[in-house]
């Protein structure tokens, strides 16, 4: 079973993924390594200073990172989903990333890979924006990205989880148990 948790930055993906991992005894795979990837490849730049080509590179590296969970033979939960490459890349490149050769194929691959997860949990941006790392501090940006994520999620079966980490975990466990009973 492959579980992906998606949502904007600072929506609680990592906290919930680690809780699910612990509660269900499955591996946690860090999917959202945006900060690590960014700092390793663009150490002297801010996110808003990247060129369109830099954003293209960043989104491709994120895409490959999200594949790690799919490549595991064991059950796992990850705090990210290929799907988020599209809204973040578009937002930070002012949609110019779409003009790069190969981008349409990239979007298709994003959708195909995202669809390989057995369960997708979506977390709305209902918790306070956490600052740090490369996380943008603009809450309106977070809400704009969230709209794009929800629009893309219409192509998938997913479950929205709300509330505290405990409440989200309990909802996730119910969905996981139903999946296991049906599977």
Image: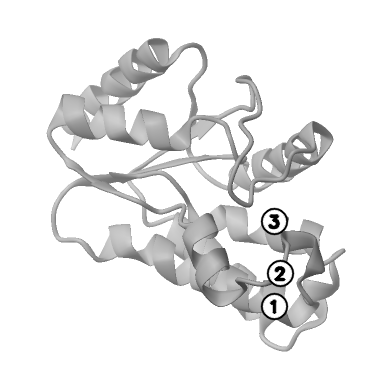
Helix or strand or loop: what does disc 1 sit on? helix
Which of marks 3 and 1 precedes in the sequence? 1
Residue pointed to by mark 1:
54
Whether residue 104 is visible to the viewer of this picture, yes or no, is no
Which of marks 3 and 2 precedes in the sequence? 2
Residue pointed to by mark 3:
88
Residue sitting nearer the eye, 171 or 158: 171
Name the image quarter holding the C terminus. top left
CB contact under 8 Å: marks 1 and 2: yes
Residue 47 spot, x, y in % from top left: 72, 61
Residue sitting nearer the eye, 139 or 179: 139
Q: Residue furthest front?
A: 44
Residue pointed to by mark 2:
45
Q: Is residue 23 left or right of residue 41?
A: left
**Closer to the camera: disc 2 or disc 3?**
2
Question: Quadrant location of residue 107?
Answer: bottom right
**Closer to the camera: disc 1 or disc 3?**
1
Residue sitting nearer the eye, 23 or 172: 23
Q: Is residue 104 left or right of residue 109?
A: right
User: Please, is residue 176 above or below residue 8 in the view?
Assistant: above
Question: Quadrant location of residue 96?
Answer: bottom right
CB contact under 8 Å: marks 2 and 3: no
């Amino acid at each position: 079973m492959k579980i992906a948790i998606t949502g904007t930055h600072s929506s609680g993906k990592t906290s919930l993924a680690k809780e699910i991992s612990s509660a269900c005894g499955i591996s946690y795979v860090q999917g959202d390594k945006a900060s690590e990837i960014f700092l390793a490849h663009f150490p002297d730049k801010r996110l808003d200073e990247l060129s369109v080509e830099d954003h293209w590179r960043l989104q491709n590296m994120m895409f490959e990172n999200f594949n790690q969970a799919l490549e595991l033979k064991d059950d796992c939960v990850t705090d990210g989903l290929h799907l988020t490459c599209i809204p973040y890349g578009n937002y930070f490149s002012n949609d110019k990333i779409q003009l790069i050769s190969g981008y349409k194929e990239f979007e298709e691959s994003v959708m195909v890979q995202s669809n390989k997860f057995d369960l997708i949990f979506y977390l709305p941006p209902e918790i306070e924006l956490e600052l740090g790392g490369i996380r943008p501090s603009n809450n309106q940006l977070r809400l704009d990205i969230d709209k794009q994520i929800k629009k893309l999620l219409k192509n998938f079966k997913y479950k929205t989880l709300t509330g505290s980490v405990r409440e989200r975990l309990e909802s996730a466990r119910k969905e996981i148990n139903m999946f296991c009973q049906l599977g």
